[in-house]
Image (cartoon, rainbow, N blue to C red):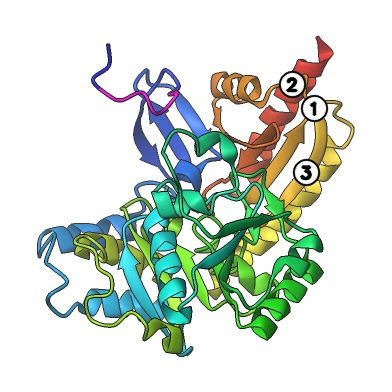
Amino acid sequence: MSALMQTYNRFPFEIVQGEGVYLTDNFGKQYLDFTSGIGVCNLGYNHPQLNAAVNTQLGKIWHTSNLYQSSLQEKVAEKLIGNAQKQVFFCNSGTEANEAAIKLARKFTGKSKLLSFHHSFHGRSIGALSVTGNDAIKHGFGELLADIEFAPYNDDAALTQINDQFAAVILEVIQGEGGVTAANANWLQRLAQQCRAAGVLLIIDEVQTGIGRTGKLFAYQHYAIEPDIITLAKGLANGLPSGAMIANSKIAAAFDYGAHGSTFGGNPLAMAAAATVLELMDAALLKNVQQKANGFYQLLEDQLSDCAAVEAISGKGLMLGIRLIESVPVKNVVEKLHQQGLLTLSARGNTLRLLPPLVISEIQLQQGLHLIKQVLSDAVAK
Ligand SMILES: *Cc1c(COP(=O)(O)O)cnc(C)c1O
């Protein structure tokens, strides 16, 4: 019997080594990676500059408390906000970032109502779970937060639900776990206007979509909207635990001394990694992601449009979904692809989810697609 709590239904192999976009398991089998550790290792594995930055910091200091100045945190925060009048709070995960956002929105507005969306995912703590639109993972934990309402995503009904009684609206501009569903731009812009008009804060959860995943530093930048609060985690430190909440300075001021905190938040090792991630995530890299992603999306449509197993293709940048017909369960496809040496993910709605490292080459994307096409064709041939 495992000594671990059985909260994960794990595949029967262990990843023991990574290099670039390739991973090796404990049996010596090599895989092309289309997961990035669920959108985390955006710059791949064993990246020389990231390794060097963390190694250097490792020899200086691993941890110090937030009682003292932190030039590393300042550096990462400045890279995140650019020239904007914003401030950053560091934590250790997406859940914590969203938890902080809920607290800040409530403290700043003095209201407690929050609007979230069906099929959203914002984390597993009581607060973050309360605004998660997935009933299947919410049972058995007693009473969750009161004052939470849900609206249908990409649906005008959501617009009529927003009024000045709400502290904030929280949403992902591309729902990840919920099935890789991108927001309709016109809908999202009207929603943002509605929030502004009603004095309701707009919290954008960029935990999965952020840090270059869609070819912009933040996915909301595709939509010409201005969030009040942004939450980040996954790709921020390329695999060292790190999360962040960014808010406009006026709102951030509601978090005065002692209002919130974290022992490990902004840890020096994580910040050394994050500073290097953000240095590497320059305009050239982002443009390259957009180019590769545009070509790959076209290729997905060309190659899979006549595949009977495929219902729809969705997503943006290198965050992509292939929705499969019911008779081809995504779990079987993921396992078949393991055998073929490709790691992929699933999402709600029988969706095969692809989150390759952003440093992947066009050839490697094509190689992965070739395997996906083969497995999907075989699945409907029988
Ligand atoms: C993964 C994820 C979270 C939760 O992040 P953790 O680091 O697992 O706590 C929150 N929101 C979104 C959109 C995510 O994809």
Image quarter of the C terminus: top right
Residue 281 appears in view: no
Q: Earlier in the sequence, mark 1 or mark 3?
A: 3
Q: Give the amino acid at mark 1.
A: Ile
Q: Which mark is residue 325?
A: 1
Element at label 3: strand
Real-space Cα distance between discs 1 and 2? 6 Å
- Give, as a single range, the part of the protein colored magenta: 4-10
For disc 3, the neighbor class at 10 Å (few under 14, some 14 to 19, many from 20) is many
Residue 262 is situated, as x and y percent measured from the top left of the image, at 24, 63
Q: Give the amino acid at mark 2.
A: Val
Q: Nearer the viewer, residue 331 or 354?
A: 331
* Relative side of 321 to 282, left or right: right
Element at label 2: loop
Residue at image mark 3 = 313
Q: Give the amino acid at mark 3.
A: Ile
Q: Which mark is residue 328?
A: 2
- Residue 373 lies within the magenta run: no
Residue 381 is situated, as x and y percent measured from the top left of the image, at 83, 13
Real-space Cα distance between discs 1 and 3? 12 Å
* Relative side of 267 to 366, left or right: left
